[in-house]
Image (spheres, grey):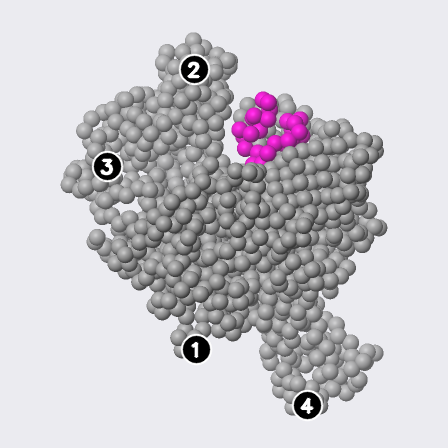
Amino acid sequence: MATHKVTMKVNGKAVSGEVESRTLLVHFLRETLRLTGTHVGCDTSQCGACTVHMNGESVKSCSLFAVQCEGQDIQTIEGVATGDQLHPMQQAFKDNHGLQCGYCTPGMIMTALDMVRRIPSPSEQEIRKNLEGNMCRCTGYHNIVKSIAAGAKAMAGAR
Amino acid sequence: MYEFDYHKAKNVKDAVAIAKKQDEAKYLAGGMSLVPPMKLRLAKPGNLIDLNEVGELAGIKVDGKTVAVGAMTRHESVAESKDVKKAIPALAKLAGGIGDPQVRHRGTIGGSLANSDPAACYPTAVLGLGATIETDQRKIAADDFFTGLFETALKEGELITKVVFPVPDKACYIKFPNPASRFSIVGVFVSKKGNEVRCVVTGAGPCVFRVKGIEDALKKDFSPKAIENYKHPASGLNSDIHGSAEYRAHLITVLAKRAVAGAE
Amino acid sequence: MGAEFGIGASVKRKEDFRFVTGRGNYLDDINRPGQAYGYFVRSPYAHAKIAGIDAKKASKMPGVVRVLTGADLEADKIGGLICGWNVKSKDGTDTRMPKHPALASDTVRYVGDAIALVVAETYAQARDAAEAVKVKYDVLPAQIDVSKADKKGAAIVHADVRRNMAYDWEIGDKKATDAAFAKAAHVAKLDLVNNRVAPNAMEPRAAIGEYSASDDSFTLYTTSQNPHVARLVLSAFVQIAPEHKLRVVSPDMGGGFGSKIFIYPDETAVIWAAKKVGRPVKWTSDRAEAFQTDCHGRDHVTHVELALDQGGKFLGLRVSTKANMGAYLSTFASCVPSYLYGTLLQGQYTTGAIHCEVKAVFTHTTPVDAVRGAGRPEATYVIERIIDVAARDLKIDPADLRRRNMIQPNAFPYQTQVALQYDSGNYPAALTKALEIADYKGFAQRRDEAKRRGKLRGIGLSSYIEACGIAPSAVVGALGCGVGLYEGATVRMNPTGSAIVYIGSHSHGQGHETTFSQVVHERLGVPFEQIEIVHGDTGKIPFGMGTYGSRSIAVGGVALQNAVDKLIEKGRKIAAHKLEVAESDIQFKDGTYSVVGTDKKTSFAEVTFAAYVPHNYPAGLEPGMEATAFYDPANFTFPAGTHVCEVEVDPDTGGVEVVKWSACDDFGRIINPMIVEGQVHGGIAHGIGQALLEGCVYDKSGQLLTASYMDYAMPRADNFPTIKVDTIQTPCPHNALGVKGCGEAGAIAAPPAVVNAIANALNVKHVEMPATAERVWQALNA
């Protein structure tokens, strides 16, 4: 089977690599680019640990082939902070104890950023509903919900 | 995942031509239903034809009488479309309740219909509004489209291009989700257009089906009360760890009543 | 020391920066030079004889390095996996511990039992080749139903275990209990099932085995809550290598919940394979494998009876349980439904006599071991459910019935009827506070309001107790445990005043790097950001028993505190020398040594510097500032509290919504309230998940029907309301920090609170877990 050369933008930088047709975006990010902040937690596209942004929208990188991302603009958790300066949403997760083991956290933050893009000041109910595609076993979601509300507020303040 | 060959289609003609040429070819739309079983090695297509850059397949057109949704239109676009919200609010709400935000950014109406998952949401709207499915070859009435478990009237290589929904007087979709997959244990779509009433159920059979008993009652009186005593037979309905046939039969009436009450 | 970073402050976690930026270092993030990938061939049958394994075709497939089978393991004399706790049966006999090879060569006993390990250049190639390994099975009947596993005609899991019985154990006084029942005014009875759950840490298990030929040593990178225990078992029992030639590293870990305590076949095969193929071998479980092979939890079938007198006093409790062990005895499986279950049946109450018998049986299912709470949720479920049944029978308010029977705050230490001695607590106070938070009095009004909306609203309580801080070694040793359950910690001061802590507790979400830093900062005054906590590496840490059973602060934290105290004592000698006074004149407070009654003082940092630059130094005193302490607790700790759940049921569909949650817990002294609260939230969600959503379901042939998130309902954000939690603090009297532990409380408390609330809403005796919409609808229409 043929391999494909694929070029895309990841966190603002042009990157390229050789992939099989069956290489998922998440594996391209983790194995080829060594961007290991994007995680895999299930096989059925439900847990959301692999959430990244494609052209500004949240997607599950375990359900996209790397070869499909030719020419696309991908953002991962590694591209959210500015150097060591945390993004307000990252800061909100830290300030509100929105994470424990941290495994689901990158996916949560990417989902949260997409949520605020669509709903600038989400209610508690809207936050809970919009986390349908992200699972966490540690926090009971309580502080994740709090973090996203605080992050949204901080982002609005920064605008 | 098994190996396969990947082809990027430029347009509909190109996509169909590749499908003709390649063995075991499948169209790749949003991939939300196709990729997970491939990862689990439950699906083994030899060739995938990616439709994601076929611009002519995406988009929504609303006129006074119909809403036409291109096959590659994402769920999110339908859910957020002002025109759809105005013309058929039930359709926008249904699209906004499929999967989760990430899935809605990728999933498409064409992919959902071609897959015909027994618990999917979109087929209820298609059958429930009496839509027409247009392909590269023909137009298929919704009543003729869904033929069985993961089976449709589509022929080998036939490609859905768009779905045309007639605008109803009112309609509503209510789903009772499986707490694990969040697909429907049972979902019910009802619509009323003039004297025509449709009531369509997903999750309870091999594919979506209409419920004549409810439709007849609603034709006389489009109110929850009219179907209060309707009892759907349990025989033949799906029965699994998420719900017995009896429970699903019961839910059909409960949800149909709520859909009638919520129709707008 | 500084209130900002000391004990009792909600210090923001120092580990968070790397996690929110994607810089965590989880196992699958690690790759070793020259690494190959492993994939396991697993049994698709619950019970079968292996008639033959043909790996010829697979071995020749692209990228395949080697296909290893059970025969190779046997040829290398690699031992089987073990269970570390011998629970003696009523008749004095030992727990039956059947052989558990890492790769089955003769018989497979559950779907997912590993048969061969395929090692290849890539993961995909290994998986491709694994499918080409041809295994011939003679399929045999499988025993899936736990309630019939010890009956005649049951399929036998292990030929050398009669009637599938691992043990038939009892605790308590049968005669006294019978006598209590004989004089009872009322006996409440209930049959219940504690549903089997899958642990579901979001990070699946993973391992990399590596062998160094130059010094004949092994390194196993693995997802382990207790790396030293893994090393001990892999060394002493599995015979991979002696302990000094085996290093176990467990880096950042995406949750454990018990599932990463155990020494599994997969990791064992991977470390052995590394030497076989002469390359590092990496294996990462996918979620389907995780569902099939991570040890499950709970799975009890129980009959319980509670005897009460006229006034509603609990006279006696009688419990009979059948506990599913699955196909093999996992590392600590045997102690979960016995010493972590029967010993907790006193609950918070003065019940006069208790007897409990437990039959632990094998079935052709995934092994069952500890999952968050382990035994204690099952005990709490039994007690708190039967109390509500009794309250319903006798028409007594459930809160009142509990209060009438609670052990009073002046009754400690309290000797229970089931071996434990409770050290401290104030159960009525926690109950009172929880009821206040819940506005228990206002419930009737909320119920009426819900009724107007067509909803059935119910309220349920759970007053739980747990035994944490596991555990006094002498006690567990006397009960058959094969190891001691102390913890070890080293504090190493650096010359410039920063500190590194090496501790056996393993953090995988609990925030140890922050909490332990607070403990060090509080006593020594070392700046919070200059304290590094190192865990999860047997090459660095002296020795440790790891993290489970809410033991990290109560055992590890106290070991750390004791190590800090040793440093203070050494520093006192240096300070006395420096300040030219007798040691007895030196006092130490807030990181400073001072001479009593004078303004002469020197800081711990200055003393530390002197210890490394000992130019002017006490004669005979060693240079350096480092201390190690091992702490073996004197008793368990006993966190307790009351949780109150309110649900609304949709009578048309049976759908249940948890609409309100209020809790008051007593964890003793709290180091970091923010982290403790987070632990409670997570535990509650875990418990609500078990009560409403989660459950492993097998079909009759032993296929696991809930092997993905499509069928196993994991709780999500919209399954919960805002949770209100508070605490009271009665310090633990027997450890230096006064702490009790908090990691499991919610998971223990929650299930009966939910089910009690549902039973209250429906006015029925019982609904089994998970209380799915259909079950509730059936209960309403029964």
Residue C551: image location, x then y, percent: 64, 58
Magenta includes C769?
yes
Query: Secondary structure under badge 4?
Result: loop
Query: Secondary structure under badge 2?
Result: helix
Sort mark 4 into few (<14), some (14-19) or many (20+) by Cα contacts within 10 Å.
few
Q: Nearer the viewer, residue C526 or B32?
A: B32
Q: Which residue is mark 1?
A: C215
User: Circle 3 marks a residue in which chain?
Assistant: B
Q: Which residue is mark 3?
A: B56
Of the residues shown, which amino acid type is indicated by label 1?
Asp
Query: Secondary structure under badge 1?
Result: loop
Residue B233: image location, x then y, percent: 44, 18
Give the CA distance from mark 3 to mark 1: 65 Å
- Disc 3 vs disc 2: Cβ atoms closer than 8 Å? no
Query: Residue C109 vs residue B73: left or right?
Result: right
The residue sitting at 71% across, 48% down in the picture is: C171
Q: Which residue is mark 4?
A: C616
Give the CA distance from mark 3 to mark 4: 85 Å
Of the residues shown, which amino acid type is indicated by label 3?
Glu
Image-quadrant location for residue C30: bottom left
Sort mark 3 into few (<14), some (14-19) or many (20+) by Cα contacts within 10 Å.
some
Task: Name, please, the residue furthest toward the top.
Answer: B220
Q: Nearer the viewer, residue C86 or B116?
A: C86
Of the residues shown, which amino acid type is indicated by label 2?
Ile
Say which label, 3 or 2, has the lower sequence index: 3
Give the CA distance from mark 4 to mark 2: 96 Å
Disc number placed over residue B214 in the picture, else none: 2
Q: Of tags 1 and 2, which is closer to the observer?
A: 1
Say which label, 4 or 1, has the lower sequence index: 1
